[in-house]
Amino acid sequence: MATRRAQIESVRVAGHLRGQGIGHALIADAEARACAAGCRLMQLTMHASRADTHRFYETLGFAPSHIRFKRDLP
């Protein structure tokens, strides 16, 4: 049986509001909603160049797991 997953994409907090716990609150709310929906895994996507954001997600227990490729279409 497949695991039900919650997907988060490109969360951003305005620069002048960072460091106030907003990101933590957003992820905590998403986790609560995912658990209530029966999800057993939460995954997210973000831009690879955002090093500070990588560290933030790692402090929340996320671990890098995939490489994603994309290409623009004509």
Image (tube, rainbow, N blue to C red):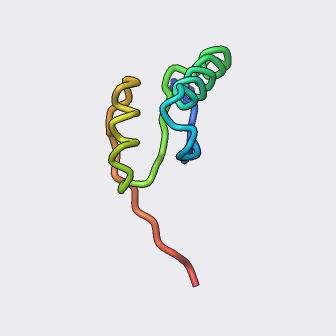
Residue in the image at 48% along x and 46% along y: 45
- Residue closest to the far bottom: 74
Q: Is residue 28 left or right of residue 61?
A: right
Q: Is residue 58 left or right of residue 31?
A: left
Residue in the image at 51% along x and 24% along y: 1
Query: As displayed, is residue 17 above or below residue 24?
Result: below
Query: As displayed, is residue 44 above or below residue 36?
Result: below
Residue 30 location, x and y as percent? 61, 26
Residue 3 location, x and y as percent? 51, 25
Q: Residue 6: which quarter of the image?
A: top right
**Residue 49 seen anywhere in this rendered image of the structure:** yes
User: Of residues 67 and 11, which is closer to you in this image?
Assistant: 11
**Residue 2 seen anywhere in this rendered image of the structure:** no
Residue in the image at 39% along x and 55% along y: 68
Residue in the image at 49% along x and 25% along y: 41
Q: Residue 31: which quarter of the image?
A: top right
Work out which quarter of the rendered image holds the C terminus and state it: bottom right
Residue 47 location, x and y as percent? 43, 54
Query: As displayed, is residue 19 above or below residue 10?
Result: above
Q: Residue 26: which quarter of the image?
A: top right
Residue 58 location, x and y as percent? 34, 31
User: Of residues 41 and 29, which is closer to you in this image?
Assistant: 29
